[in-house]
Image (cartoon, rainbow, N blue to C red):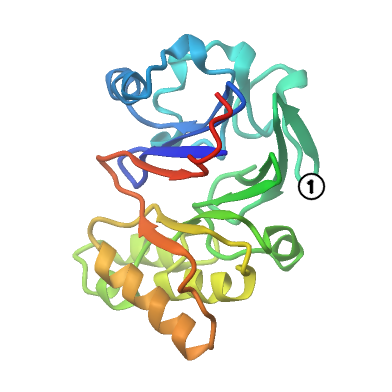
């Protein structure tokens, strides 16, 4: 399994996951030009995309969906008005080529927001962004993943020092907002295992976070909790640059 995060943040989100010649996209909140440019770097075109999964209906996740046929778009019924056969339900698994995709609810201020656990060729990828917290029932499904693409949106101190209006700060820091660096790190400290190979911190705020702060928070919390992450590649997704990850040693394509 390989993944390519084309964009991650409030200005647009889009991730490609590939294995065994099957190409799955999660969200498309970027422009057609940007999407095609990223795909071309991988020798792919829009015609090579087999399915598009949508996490929720905020514009930074769906603005570019119109380049795809509705026939390949999948979401909960609350997110897009899609055909019944293309609706996703929580706590159910779906087959997309070589991928088994399990859907779970997230806590965000839009109805029907979801995340995904994706399995392929004995590997497991957890994709979760745009959530104020993680439901207790969901946590067990997220454990022992090979790869985590995991929201680490803001630093609390930096958030409180922004010039954002108070209602927006309250929204972001609320139960239907986003995960802070500290919350994300605490969750991850309970989820990862020696089978975990990579953690990519995602959806970093450009106003209330930065890569060094997010990574330092994660490393400090892991150290305090006695969690060994020396075997794990840890980095941050970016808003304007592609970040690649996954198993490139096994060339399934």
Residue 70 position in % (x across, y down): 59, 13
In the rendered image, is residue 66 in sight? Answer: yes
Q: Quadrant of the N terminus?
A: top right
Residue 190 position in % (x across, y down): 62, 75
- Asked whether 76 or 94 is in front, the reply is 94
- Please rate how many residues cluster around mark 1, counting C-alpha atoms within 10 Å: few if below 14, some from 14 to 19, many from 20: few
The quarter of the picture where residue 220 lies is bottom left
Residue 25 position in % (x across, y down): 52, 29
- Asked whether 6 or 133 is in front, the reply is 6
Tag 1's secondary structure? loop
Q: Is residue 162 above or below residue 186?
A: above
Q: Quadrant of the C terminus?
A: top right
In the rendered image, is residue 152 in sight? Answer: no
Q: Is residue 208 above or below residue 57?
A: below
- Indicate left or right for 132 with 36 as reference: right
Q: Is residue 119 above or below residue 215?
A: above
- Indicate left or right for 40 with 93 as reference: left
Residue that appears at 42% across and 37% down: 4
- Asked whether 102 or 167 is in front, the reply is 102
Residue at numbered disc 1? 91
Name, please, the residue furthest toward the left. Answer: 163
Residue 186 position in % (x across, y down): 53, 77
Residue that appears at 30% across and 48% down: 238
């Amino acid at each position: 399994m390989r993944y390519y995060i084309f964009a991650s943040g409030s200005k647009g989100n889009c991730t490609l996951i590939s294995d065994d010649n099957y190409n799955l996209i999660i969200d498309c909140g970027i422009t057609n030009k940007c999407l095609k440019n990223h795909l071309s770097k991988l020798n792919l075109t829009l015609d090579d995309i087999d399915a598009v999964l949508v996490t929720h209906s905020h514009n930074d996740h769906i603005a570019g969906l119109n380049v795809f046929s509705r026939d390949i778009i999948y979401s909960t019924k609350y997110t897009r008005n899609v055909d019944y056969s293309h609706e996703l339900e929580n706590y159910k698994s779906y087959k997309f080529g070589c991928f088994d995709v399990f859907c779970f609810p997230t806590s965000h201020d839009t109805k029907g927001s979801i995340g995904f656990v994706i399995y392929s060729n004995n590997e497991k990828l957890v994709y979760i962004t745009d959530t104020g917290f993680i439901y207790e029932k969901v946590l067990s499904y997220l454990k022992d993943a090979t790869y985590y693409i995991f929201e680490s949106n803001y630093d609390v101190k930096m958030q409180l020092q922004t010039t954002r209006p108070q209602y927006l700060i309250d929204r972001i820091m609320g139960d239907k907002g986003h995960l802070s660096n500290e919350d994300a790190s605490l969750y991850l400290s309970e989820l990862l295992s020696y089978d975990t190979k990579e953690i990519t911190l995602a959806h970093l705020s450009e106003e209330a976070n930065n890569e060094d702060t997010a990574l330092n928070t994660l490393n400090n919390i892991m150290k305090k909790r006695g969690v060994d992450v020396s075997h794990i590649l840890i980095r941050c997704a970016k808003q304007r640059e592609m970040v690649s990850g996954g198993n490139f040693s096994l060339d399934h394509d």
